Amino acid sequence: MLIHFYKGHLFCLACVQGIANGEKTFKCPSDDCNIEISLDNLIVCVVADRSVQDAKFMNPSAPREGSHIKRQEKDSHLLTCLNQIVQCPYQDNCIDTMMRKDLESHIQSSPLVHVASTPEQYKLKLNGLMNEKSKLESTMGESSTKLDDLVVQIKEIQLIIGDETNQRA
């Protein structure tokens, strides 16, 4: 769905919601346009939406790089768009939504909330922790406290994986 802004600027609704980042008002993402826009007053441009099936759209996440997206590529673009609003993948414990580009820092900000719940997730988490441990070991110095915390987390996950494996047998 295309949204019409001041001076004829058009953007897809999903990208606009990502740029707004949960705020009620935001600036038009077009270069040199400092108009404040309210999410409550967005105008869907049906005529433009129907007439530009093969047109290219500016990607608001990279306007200066000249990133343009064909209408037919919109759905695949939204799967990777850094400004797309996504839900936390740990929906059993977390109901937060954020821009895709903020997802990794969100998960790292509350590790106790973002814990795995299946053996596969535990193994993925374990691999990530082991990689992080290796990186920390190579840069040691003042990171020894964080390293000790990671070792404890790794041991806890290994115990959980061992318990689940034993329960299945």
Image (spheres, rainbow, N blue to C red):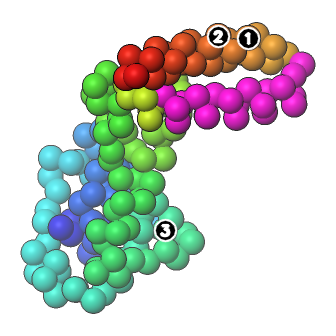
Q: Which mark is residue 123?
A: none
Q: Is residue 16 visible?
A: yes
Query: Which residue is under mark 2?
Result: 152
Question: Do the residues under discs 3 and 1 have CB atoms within 8 angstroms?
Answer: no
Looking at the rendering, in which quadrant would you find the N terminus? bottom left
Query: Which residue is under mark 3?
Result: 63
Q: Which residue is more in the foreground, 36 or 148? A: 148
Question: Do the residues under discs 1 and 2 have CB atoms within 8 angstroms?
Answer: yes
* Residue plotted at (28% across, 81% down): 72
* Residue plotted at (75% across, 17% down): 147
Residue found at the very far left of the displayed protein: 46
Q: Please rate how many residues cluster around mark 1, counting C-alpha atoms within 10 Å: few if below 14, some from 14 to 19, many from 20.
A: few
Helix or strand or loop: what does disc 1 sit on? helix
Upstream in sequence: badge 3 or badge 1: 3
At label 1, which amino acid type do we have? Asp
* Residue plotted at (14% across, 62% down): 43
Please determine whether, in this image, residue 39 is positioned above or below residue 62.
above
Residue 29, how many percent across, how many down? 40, 60
Looking at the rendering, in which quadrant would you find the C terminus? top left
Q: Is residue 26 visible?
A: no
Left or right relative to 94: residue 114: right
Query: Which residue is under mark 1?
Result: 148
Q: Please rate how many residues cluster around mark 3, counting C-alpha atoms within 10 Å: few if below 14, some from 14 to 19, many from 20.
A: few
Q: Please rate how many residues cluster around mark 2, counting C-alpha atoms within 10 Å: few if below 14, some from 14 to 19, many from 20.
A: few
Residue 112, how many percent across, how many down? 46, 15
Upstream in sequence: badge 2 or badge 3: 3
Question: Quarter of the image holding residue 154?
Answer: top right
Magenta residues span 122-141
At label 3, which amino acid type do we have? Pro
